[in-house]
Image: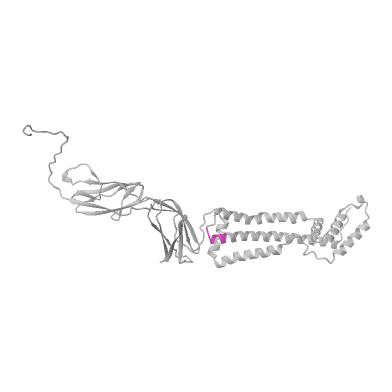
């Protein structure tokens, strides 16, 4: 049979074992809180300077969650499940108090042995246990937990949580936005910036080899209005723009190749792909006519135009049709929208009663328009009597017999 340990000795070891459990589990929990708070603070800090990629936010979230999902269970397995016996507690005590720990471990192992099988003296065992109990009665094992770092982890967790709380108090909008981007990195949540501008496109089509401007306008809820902004195309010199009436107008030099444009305005950052393209031009232009009824024409007349003017009989109705060099988005004549399908243009029929000018302007699907408005001069001419026109069909030379 096993010998019962003295109550004092058993209580001391049980209290020490419980202390180890509490300290190590507290370390794991505090480390997990610190890891989660730190991963959030890193996302919050990085978002203040640039657009934190989704993969990096996901990595920080997983790293912070691992301290709770993996670190705490490992702590429990190592310091609770594997240290649940009194002899395990004695072995741990031996790390900080070698002599006393060896003595207690020997007493516990001695108590677990069968004295009949070992041929030992029960009286001697009891005396050894009494001596060990007397040695530990005044001992305090509170600080004997090996490698106890719960205080350090406590300060670290408190400091990181305090910074997170301070962020929510001082800049609540930015803190909530960072929290959403941190917790859901797979969603395309827009980064919060103190400098806010109206939405910009992801790519910008500009006229080929021509200077162009890009306006940036602050929104009404922008908390900051920097005096100056900066834009740089690829490795070209940076272009500066001053604040003027709530907007920044960047003037860039001509471009011939696709290149990224990096914009910087306060804590606002965005990259746009600049795509130089030729302006859309008209490849064909014609006027369609319905002549006055008294001429008894049964079909529509079509005249190709190779210039900016055309003569039309008074009383006729005329419309223009054209084909552009690329698909168009909108077409206007004299400020009125016209029919467009792909690269084809057709205007409505209008009676011709006097000389007039028709202004045609178009815009392609990329937002480019011609450099100048096309002005078509329509001259209204009066009807005249028919004239005889003779035309030689062949080049044959004829000489009369009376001529030399």
Q: Is residue 48 magenta?
A: yes
Where is residue 259 drawn, in percent x and y?
A: 45, 52
User: Is 206 positioned to the left or the right of 224 in the image?
Assistant: left
Q: Is residue 100 magenta?
A: no
Residue at left offset 57%, top offset 65%: 167
User: Is 357 positioned to the left or the right of 159 in the image?
Assistant: left
Where is residue 362 drawn, in percent x and y?
A: 33, 52
Coloring scheme used: one colour
Q: Nearer the viewer, residue 10 or 404?
A: 404
Residue sitting at the far left = 402
For the C terminus, the quadrant is: top left
Residue at left offset 68%, top offset 62%: 153
Residue sitting at the far top = 401
Q: Nearer the viewer, residue 30 or 217?
A: 217
Where is residue 239 drawn, in percent x and y?
A: 44, 60
The magenta segment is: 43-50
Number of on-image labels: 0
Q: Nearer the viewer, residue 115 or 371?
A: 371
- Vertical arrangement, residue 306 with respect to residue 6, above or below: above
- Vertical arrangement, residue 302 with respect to residue 110, above or below: above
Residue sitting at the far bottom = 170
User: Is 249 positioned to the left or the right of 176 in the image?
Assistant: left
């Amino acid at each position: 049979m096993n010998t019962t340990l003295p109550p004092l000795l058993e209580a001391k070891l049980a209290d020490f074992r419980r202390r180890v459990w509490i300290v190590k589990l507290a370390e794991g929990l505090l480390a997990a809180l610190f890891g989660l708070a730190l991963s959030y603070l890193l996302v919050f800090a990085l978002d203040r300077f640039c657009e934190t990629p989704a993969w990096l936010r996901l990595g920080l979230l997983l790293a912070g969650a691992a301290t709770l999902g993996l670190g705490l269970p490992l702590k429990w397995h190592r310091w609770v499940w594997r240290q649940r016996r009194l002899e395990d507690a004695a072995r741990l005590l031996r790390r900080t108090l070698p002599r006393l720990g060896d003595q207690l471990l020997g007493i516990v192992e001695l108590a677990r042995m069968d004295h009949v099988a070992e041929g030992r003296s029960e009286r001697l065992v009891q005396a050894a246990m009494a001596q060990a109990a007397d040695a530990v009665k005044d001992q305090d094992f509170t600080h004997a937990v090996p490698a106890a770092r719960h205080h350090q982890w406590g300060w670290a967790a408190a400091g990181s949580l305090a910074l997170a709380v301070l962020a929510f108090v001082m800049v609540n909008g930015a803190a909530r936005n960072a929290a959403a981007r941190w917790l859901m990195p797979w969603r395309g949540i827009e980064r919060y910036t103190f400098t806010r501008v109206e939405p910009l496109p992801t790519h910008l089509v500009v006229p080929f080899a021509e200077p162009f401007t890009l306006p940036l306008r602050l929104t009404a809820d922008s908390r900051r209005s920097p005096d100056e902004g900066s834009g740089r195309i690829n490795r070209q010199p940076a272009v500066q723009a001053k604040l003027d009436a709530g907007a920044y107008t960047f003037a860039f030099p001509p471009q011939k190749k696709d290149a990224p444009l990096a914009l910087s305005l306060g804590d606002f950052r965005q990259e746009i792909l600049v795509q130089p393209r030729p302006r859309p031009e008209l490849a064909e232009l014609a006027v369609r006519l319905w002549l006055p009824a008294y001429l008894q024409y049964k079909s529509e007349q079509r005249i190709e135009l190779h210039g900016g003017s055309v003569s039309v009989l008074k009383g006729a109705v005329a419309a223009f049709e054209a084909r552009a060099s690329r698909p168009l988005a909108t077409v206007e004549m004299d400020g009125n929208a016209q029919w467009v399908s792909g690269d084809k243009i057709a205007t409505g029929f209008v009676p011709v009663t006097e000389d007039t000018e028709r202004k045609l302007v178009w815009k392609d699907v990329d937002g480019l328009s011609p450099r100048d408005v096309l002005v078509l001069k329509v001259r209204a001419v009066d009807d005249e009597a028919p004239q005889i026109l003779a035309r030689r069909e062949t080049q044959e030379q004829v000489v009369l017999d009376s001529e030399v």
